[in-house]
Image: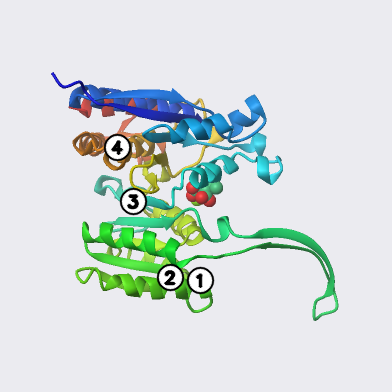
Amino acid sequence: MIPSATHKIAVIKGDGIGPEIVSSAMRVLDKTAAQYGFRLSYKELRAGGCAIDDCGVPLPSDTLEGCKSSDAVLLGAVGGPKWDSMEPSLRPERALLGLRAGLGLYSNLRPALLFKELASASPLKDAGEIDILIVRELTGGIYFGDNGMYESDDMLPDGSVKGVVAYDTEAYSEGEIRRIVRQAFELARGRNKHLTLVDKANVLRTSRLWRSVAGEIASEFPDVTLDYLYVDNCTMQLIGRPSSFDVIVTSNMFGDIISDEAGMITGSIGMLPSASLGAPGTPGMYEPIHGSAPDIAGTGKANPLATILSAAMMLRWSLDESEAASCIENAVRGVISAGYRTPDIASGAEGEIHVDTEGMTEAVLKFVV
Ligand code: IPM
Ligand code: MG
């Protein structure tokens, strides 16, 4: 008999609701693995606020090393008010940026899908069908550019003194743009063959480089329609005509902003998963888009579905277990159409079954068949 594959998962539960939602996802993963004949071995690692409390830094080196030697990383959420006053290099968010940079995770896939049963949770009055994949560049741009702060005695034209000056720099190389845009084209090819590059090319030089690189790559994908939108216009169009989008590719900063907007229009950020990917063969990182929600930690109100769907993305993108991934995604579809609702997606409509984190996890487990 062929021994079943064992996938090594680095687990970072993190802060706030992180431990609750990751535990839910692990239960769903374990049942799915048993069903599909593979094994998962977990190694729990610390990052974020809990790592600051335990060892004084948000991303201990053994955490990064542990992630590098795994097949994939499953992460809950990091941060909380307790650590908000830490100096910038010691804030919990640094752990995320350190993991992204340290693992070379340049591509962040953020699917925003509106389940038709949850249309009433969308703030749009006629949301239609929303199925957007945001491909966000994740290790370049203003997040990682040159930055600094200095004191200046120079005068502004109105005669006042400049004083402290802080700066963050947006820089992109052709190589960085090319690899993410090519991946976005490939993803669009497997979907509705429509790619939108979101930028600010009327103002920014970096955006003009994105356009010229995307234009070149477009010739390799004659079957995919490429169009362009300025980011300010994009924020309006996402609300006005969300169903006309398929794949969006964009820079780190613009992707951060529009993916929150996409989360809102699809009803609840508690439903949205993400995958962060690097070079083929290196471990990807999977996490819900939402944060650590310290206000509801420990209350059972957290929606575990974004993390469960992130676990499904992990099976598909890093572990080559796409049937098991589809099984989890179908189970989530199943619980939504059966009416199970955590507080963030409950509308009070007839037929809803109101559940807590545990109840939602149990429901998904029942649908994993
Ligand atoms: C995200 C978050 C992070 C980001 C923060 C927590 C550093 O907002 O993943 O969208 O800005 O990338
Ligand atoms: Mg964000």
Amino acid found under the numbered disc labelled 2? Trp
Instruction: Give coordinates of residue 32: x percent, y percent.
Output: 24, 27
Q: Answer with mark 1 or mark 4, whichever residue precedes in sequence.
A: 1
Ligand 1 under 8 Å from disc 2 Cβ: no
Q: Any mark on residue 111, and which?
A: 3
Identify the residue position indicated by label 1 in the image.
206
Q: Which mark is residue 210?
A: 2
Element type where label 2 sits in the image: helix
Pointers 1 and 2 in contact (C-beta within 8 Å):
yes
User: Which quadrant, please, contains the C terminus?
Assistant: top left
Tell me the residue at 60%/37% (across/down): 80
Q: Earlier in the sequence, mark 3 or mark 1?
A: 3
The residue positioned farthest toward the top in the image shown: 1
278 versus 353 height, above or below = below
- Mark 1 and mark 4: Cα distance apart in space: 34 Å
Residue at 38% of width from left, 49% of height from top? 279
The one of 333 and 210 positioned closer to us in this rendering: 210
Q: Quadrant of residue 331?
A: top left
Between 162 and 335, the one nearer to me in the picture: 162
- In the displayed structure, does residue 174 sit left or right of residue 26? right
Question: Foreground mark, 3 or 1?
Answer: 1
SS at mark 1 in the image: helix
Residue extending farthest to the bottom is: 157
Find the distance from the CA under tag 2 to the CA under tag 3.
22 Å
Image quarter in which the N terminus is found: top left
Looking at numbered disc 1 in the image, what kind of residue is underneath it? Thr
Instruction: Please report whichever mark, 2 or 3, sits nearer to the chain's N-terminal start.
Output: 3
Q: CA distance from mark 3 to mark 1?
A: 25 Å
In the drawing, what numbered circle is on residue 287? none
